[in-house]
Amino acid sequence: MYLEYWGLESSPFANVPSESLFYPSPQHEEAMSRILYVIKNRRGVAMLTGEVGCGKTTVTKILMKSLSKDKFRFQLLSNPAMGPLDLIRAILLNLGEKTVNGFKPVLLSQLQDRLICNAAEGVNTILAIDEAHVINNRKTLDELRMLLNIQHDDQFLITLILLGQPPLLKKIAELQPLKERISVKYNLTPLDEKNTLRYIIYRLKSVGAERGYFTAESILPLFQYSGGIPLRINNICDRCLLIGYMRKSTVIDTRIVADAIADLQ
């Protein structure tokens, strides 16, 4: 609606994860480095936590695309709130296997065969569990831990990446056997004010903007409202551009930001 007015090729502030508009902040770069260490060294489990909209899923998808498909089989499981048996079925389906027999020992044997086959072909299997904080069944979490018992030549045949909101930390803390298997964990914190500004400029330039549009004074109230969380920054910036377009403004000033905040509350 406002793209032509602002001279933009596409929406810079959509409220869905965008790999093409990924801003590599220091904390996002560190998150990727830590997870990559776990993957390439077959260290078992990595855990990435953070508030809604901090970029956990985007970080994982960027990593997924960066790894060679010849050497890595990277799958993302997005709806993990299920029982142990359904979890095993879901993992098998994600790995391209058919689940004919519903008996757990058969399914586990099938999964082990798949992982061994991948390893024999020189393929490292990675499974990312998104929204892991919604898993309320302790047996399901324990089943994930048990997957690490599938080993060959003293190496894990699967690498797990647990992604979730802060409540995941408490759930894992209560499961000592799984907690001890986590070799790397990282909490993805919000952007500071400086990186909030850089984030906005980066995304605008990525879609063809020739200038920043937002005045220097407008960044502080925008940062304070969003708390530096990328999803919230997107929501308020998108509303600001819409209001600016409707008012035929040439810049986004503090008044437009204030009205956008009021509009979102």
Image: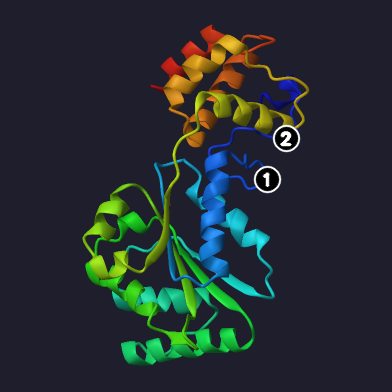
Label 1 neighbourhood size at 10 Å, few (<14), some (14-19), many (20+)?
few
In the picture of the structure, the residue carrying the numbered disc 2 is 206
| Residue at screen point 47% across, 15% down | 221
Residue sitting nearer the eye, 264 or 237: 237
Which numbered dot is residue 20? 1
As measured in the structure, the alpha-carbon distance from the residue carrying label 2 to the one carrying label 1 is: 9 Å
Q: Is residue 223 above or below residue 34?
A: above
> Taking 180 as reference, is 90 left or right?
right
Residue sitting nearer the eye, 179 or 129: 179
Q: Is residue 103 visible?
A: no
| Amino acid marked by disc 1 | Ser
Q: Position of residue 87 (x, y in %)?
A: 36, 73
Q: Say what secondary structure mark 2 lies in.
A: helix
Q: How is the image coloured?
A: rainbow
Kindly indicate the quadrant of the structure image that contains residue 211. top right
Q: Is residue 183 visible?
A: yes
Kindly indicate the quadrant of the structure image that contains residue 199. top right
